[in-house]
Image (cartoon, rainbow, N blue to C red):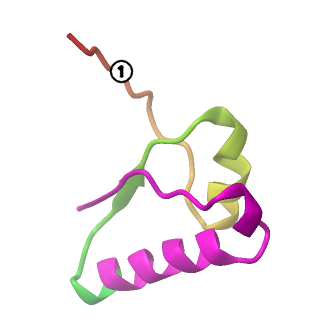
Amino acid sequence: MGLIEDVAVSKSARYQGIAQSLIQKLQQGARSEDGYKSILNCPEDVVPFHERCHFHPKKIQMRWNP
């Protein structure tokens, strides 16, 4: 299982395919290691981007920071 966390591209470099390329490389790495799933957490406003990268919503994450 892989966890993708804190993928970010600066505002000046957005819409150039960089984030999608990073996600694809991580997906390729997961496949090559016989990973059975990769998960990530993201704000609601970027869900459409991750759906275009073939991720789908699953469950709800809960968090508590002491």
The residue positioned 44% from the left and 27% from the top of the image is: 60
Residue 31 as seen in the image, left or right of residue 11? left
Q: Which residue extends farthest top?
A: 66
Query: What segment carries the magenta color?
Result: 1-30
Which of the 4 image quarters holds residue 27?
A: bottom left
Q: Which residue extends farthest front?
A: 12
The residue positioned 38% from the left and 52% from the top of the image is: 5
The residue positioned 48% from the left and 58% from the top of the image is: 7
Name the secondary structure under disc 1: loop
Q: Is residue 54 found inside the magenta-colored segment of the image? A: no
Residue 38 percent across, percent down from the top left? 36, 61
Residue 40 percent across, percent down from the top left? 42, 50
Residue 37 as seen in the image, left or right of residue 45? left
Q: Which residue extends farthest bottom?
A: 32
Residue 42 as seen in the image, left or right of residue 39? right
For the image shown, how many numbered marks are present on the structure? 1
Q: Is residue 7 found inside the magenta-colored segment of the image? A: yes
The residue positioned 64% from the left and 59% from the top of the image is: 10
To which residue does mark 1 refer? Answer: 62
Point out the image quarter for the N terminus: bottom left
Amino acid bearing label 1: Met
Front residue (pair 42, 39): 42
In this rendering, is residue 3 above or below 15? above
Point out the image quarter for the C terminus: top left
